[in-house]
Amino acid sequence: MRLLYFIFALIALAVISLFVGVKDIAVSDLFRWTDEQQLVMSISRIPRTVALILAGVGMSICGLIMQQMTQNRFVAPTTAGTLDAAKMGILASILFASQSGNFTRILFAFGFTFLASIIFLKIADRIRYRNIIFVPLVGLMFGGILNSITTFFAYKNNVVQNVNAWMVGDFSGILQGNYELVYLSIPAVVITYLYANKFTVVGMGENFSKNLGLNYRTVLNIGLFCVALTVSVVVLTVGTIPFLGLVIPNIVSILYGDNLRKTLPITAVFGAIFLLICDIIGRLIIFPFEVPIGMTVGIVGGVIFLILLIKKQR
């Protein structure tokens, strides 16, 4: 029943998103739209709303997977260097395959993100002081190193502006024909649901997983595959969206518990709702101009993250 309420809220916000913008399109004129209004709706508004929903679902699920595999509530793409690795992969594609299309860039971003996720998990396993806050702090330092390397090579090759384009998430440039890659996140979400219980077992450790007859490495790699694919397509399509994969799973866990198979759909829908709300606020706060969603989510998510940290320390 709760999930049904969230779905209704998601539909309502999606409809609001379709009719918020500089171009005035009224719901009352649904069957009397001009050709220009129909064009705006089909080329810009609908693709943008779909991209918002898929990005919100995908990034929230990524955070949930990483938190389950590490058994740490503060591990997510933002605090594990995953977003920074995706940017590094995109830079590598610009330097070594500049004439290639977006699919090649996804392959580069996916490879770097997958490798960085494995490295982070190796580092996390070797940390003796397993404080819940210390692990994500190490992840933030790891991400900072990756970001510094990316900035250095971008500066050396005069592509700093190209790299900066991926720094802040922004849906204003989403148009029909340049957002469809985000659909690749759907298979990752489906796989996550199918392996939900196995991800929970993997989070208990390698020995515990093997005692239950589970192939630890295979399930771990499947989880990292889902995270790497989703993060790569989202960053390539709209840029980085900080804190989304961190705060949404934590909020859902506080409200509805830790049963992954039960909370997974709620996390997905709630992530899309959160992103739609932030996007609508960003479009209205200085209308007719727009605040990039990376900034609105960063501010709201950062405040929530700080509250969660303070609460956990107490």
Image (tube, helix red, strand yellow):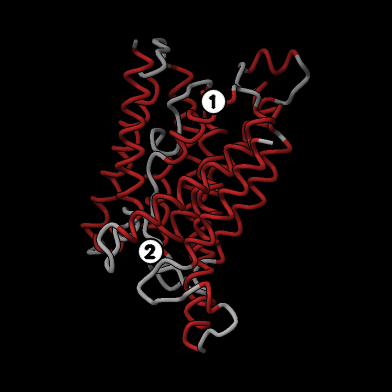
Q: Amino acid at mark 1?
A: Leu
Residue at x 57%, y 33% (from the top left corner): 65
Residue at the far front: name it. Answer: 28
Give the residue displayed 39% in from the left and 50% down from the top.
Answer: 278
> Residue 158: x percent and y percent?
22, 64
- Side of 270 where 198 appears, left or right: right
Q: Amino acid at mark 2?
A: Ile
Which mark identifies residue 292?
Answer: none
Q: On the image, which quarter does residue 138 sit in?
A: top left
Residue closest to the eye, 226 or 25: 25
Viewer-side label of 1, 2 = 1
Residue at x 35%, y 30% (from the top left corner): 305
Residue at the disc numbered 1: 255
Q: Residue 38 in the image: x percent, y percent?
A: 53, 82
Residues marked 1 and 2 touching at CB (< 8 Å): no
Residue 93 percent across, percent down from the top left: 42, 61
Mark 1 to mark 2 CA distance (whole Å): 43 Å
Position of residue 249 measured from the top left corner of the image (x, y, whole percent): 51, 32
Q: Is residue 286 left or right of residue 185?
A: left
Query: Of helix, strand and loop, which one carries label 2?
Result: helix
